[in-house]
Image (cartoon, rainbow, N blue to C red):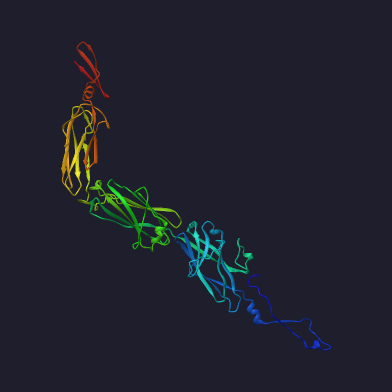
Amino acid sequence: MPPDSSVITNFDLQLYTCLSQATCSLPDSISLKAKPTAITALSNNPQLSLTQDDNSVQIEGDTICWNVSLTNSSVSGTTLANNVFFAINDPAVSGVLSGWHFYPTGSSVPNVLDGVIVPIIDSLAPGAAIGGNLCAAVTDCPVNDSLIFGLYYGWNCGGYPQAPFDTLALCEFQTDSLRMNVIIGQLFSSGKTYETPYKLCDTISFTTCFQNFNEGNLFPQQLVLDSIVDGIDIISGTMSNGTLSVQLTATVNDSLWLIHPDSIALLYPSGGFNVTSSDFCVTMTASLGCNFAGSNVLPNKTLYVTNVCGALDSLPVPYTTLGAFVWDTTSYCTDCFTLNKFSNDTLVATGDPVTYQVVACNYNASTNTVALVDLLPSGFIPTTNLPATTTLLPMECDTFAVTGTFFLSGGCPAMTNNAFLIFNGDTTAASACVEVVSSSAICQDSADIVWTGTINSNQLVTTFPIRQFTLLTLLW
């Protein structure tokens, strides 16, 4: 049946009384008199009207929805609008939107057919309306961050439209348009905090919060730490929306922490946060070990996110060299020692005096006696030695000088001097290396002057080539 067609099914045939008589004079034609009320009622096919809250909707996540309503605006008594549908068959949405479906108001179960044709309701009475969300999956962002496309809606005889969608096979339809816009989120850091002062062999936490300047969602993917200095051990990581905290997913690498989609959905149901959301905060918990003594360096954080178009973005937040992050010189350690060994000389000659400095520190809350072992390199004759043991007070460092001379030459690492601090079977090592050259080689180099001379009368000419210069001396 074509749109807006009318069929007359009720009419009056005029009966002339003379037909029963012997003679009768009839007009050239017989007129049919239709009943106006019957024609009026049956000439109104179901008429649908579309209402949209806003036909321009922005992408905020991987799904986009328009709030729409269809009303059967036909007069009472008209035939029901059967098999009411939406259809989105515009080539402009190809590769951008797919999987169209409809959530009737109050329902969490979508009406879906083939992703193009969307069934709305089997029958809609005159004067009745049905509303809900018409939604699609976002597979890509449109060119120029905006797209207007056509929308079909109508009713159909004998069932919902079949694929492929064909307007010629429909009982009645109308068209309208929808528009989608893209707003890209803008990530920034809203602050960072850390516990200070710190104590050795204790745990601390340091937190970074992120916000989104725009309405387009940002979807956290992972957190990367860098500049993890010696002595700090990352224990765990959590993310929070200010009310609820969820664990980050650890990896075999302390510097990489993943954000699982199921975890972020507990904080933000859409999986992302925007300008209207609470801050997205990440807190790392770390243990500060013995070697962290005196450091003021915490790892930098970089948050990686994807926007509504799937593009990757990141924001680094530096933590290194924090002037306010200080050690209070106390310790909870029970086995925390450091050992350092160095020499102010990097190159000496055999026979010259050499001094090594050995610094042993006790970063524990108690006094401890430790053993010291010095493995001197070959050819070194000490004049003062490292003591076999020393007693270190809590939070105390002692410095020892080891002096002597080399009688053999050699380079690094062959001439490395190794020292060890031993406590309760645990060993802490330190080393230093000094390059040694032969003093006889130095003397030979200084005497290695080539000279030539001729004696002619009372004149002596000698030539001394020294490095790049030639010295000419005339003796008269």
- In front of the other: 441 or 467: 441
Measured as percent of width and height from the top left, residue 176 is found at: 55, 67
Give above or below for 357 relative to 134: above
| Quarter of the figure with residue 19 | bottom right
| Along the line of sight, the residue nearer the viewer: 444 or 135 | 135
Which residue lies most toward the front here?
Answer: 425
- State left or right for residue 29 relative to residue 463: right
Picture quadrant where residue 9 is located:
bottom right
Quarter of the image where the C terminus is located: top left
On screen, 168 above or below 199?
below
Q: How many marks?
A: 0
Q: Is residue 401 visible?
A: yes
The image position of residue 310, as x and y in percent, is 45, 55
Position of residue 192 relative to residue 386, above or below, is: below
Residue, x 21% and y 19% (percent of image)? 473
At horizontal 48% and vertical 67% (from top left) the residue drawn is 108
* Residue that lies at the very extreme toward the right in this rendered image: 22
Tell me residue 432's x, y (percent).
24, 36
From the viewer's perspective, tell me whether residue 239 is left or right of residue 84.
left
- Residue at image location 42% in from the left, 62% down from the top: 269
Question: 202 or 345, which lies in front?
Answer: 202
Q: Is residue 185 visible?
A: no
Position of 118 with respect to 168 (left or right) is left
Q: Nearer the viewer, residue 8 or 128?
A: 128
Q: Quadrant of the N terminus?
A: bottom right
- Image position, residue 289 (x, y; %): 26, 48
